[in-house]
Amino acid sequence: MKPSWAQALRLSSIPDQHYSLSAEKRQLLYWSAISLKHPAIVEIGVCHGGTAMMLAYVAKCLGGTYLGVDNWSLEGSYEDVRQVLDEEDLQEPEVTLEFGDSRTIDLPDSPIDLLLIDGGHQIGVVDKDCANWIPFVK
C-alpha cells in the first residue's frame, strides 16, 4: 500500500505538537522515507510521537520497520505514544518503541535506511548519538 501525505500529516498531528517538527520538516522526512523500499527507519528522540506516527505509518505501508528510541525524560511518555500507535494499527513487529538511552541501548543488527537524530540537544549528546548510530546507516 502506498502511503499518502494526507494520512501521514494527519497521524503526525495527533499527539501534542509541543516539540514537534514543522510541517515542512515533516514533509521532507515523508518524501525521504517514501523513496525507500522496505525501509528500516530509526528515530532517536520520540517525545510526544508526532514524527513517530508518520514514520511508523510510512514504514508499515512500505513493508519496512520503524524503531523509536527515547527515555521520555523531557516530555511525553512511552505509554501515551504506544497507545496512539496501537489505536492507529501501527504495532509490533513492524513498529517498535525502545524505552531507554540512545547511547546505551542495544544497537541494531541490520542496516538503517533513514535515521533521525532528535534526542538530547547538547553537543556531547548529539556527538555520541552520531558516533553510535551513523555507522549503521546504509
Image (tube, helix red, strand yellow):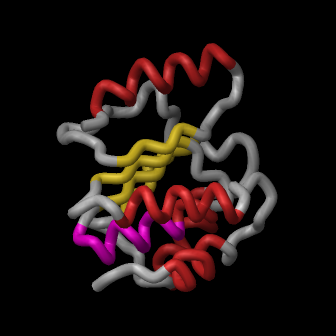
**Image location (x, y in percent) of residue 119:** 61, 37
Q: Is residue 15 left or right of residue 114?
A: right
Up-down: is 128 above or below 82?
Answer: above
Q: Is residue 79 visible?
A: no
Please report the residue visible at 32 percent of the width from the left and 72 percent of the height from the top: 60
**Image location (x, y in percent) of residue 138:** 25, 37
Is 58 within the magenta? yes
Please report the residue visible at 19 percent of the width from the left and 38 percent of the height from the top: 109
Please report the residue visible at 33 percent of the width from the left and 62 percent of the height from the top: 35
**Image location (x, y in percent) of residue 91:** 37, 73
Q: Is residue 53 left or right of residue 114?
A: right
Q: Which quadrant of the figure has residue 64? A: bottom left
Please report the residue visible at 41 percent of the width from the left and 76 percent of the height from the top: 90
Front residue of 61 and 16: 61
Which residue is the extreme one toward the top?
A: 124
Is 2 within the magenta? no
Q: Is residue 76 left or right of residue 7?
A: right
Q: Which quadrant of the figure has residue 49? A: bottom right
**Image location (x, y in percent) of residue 75:** 75, 50
* Span shown in magenta: 53-63
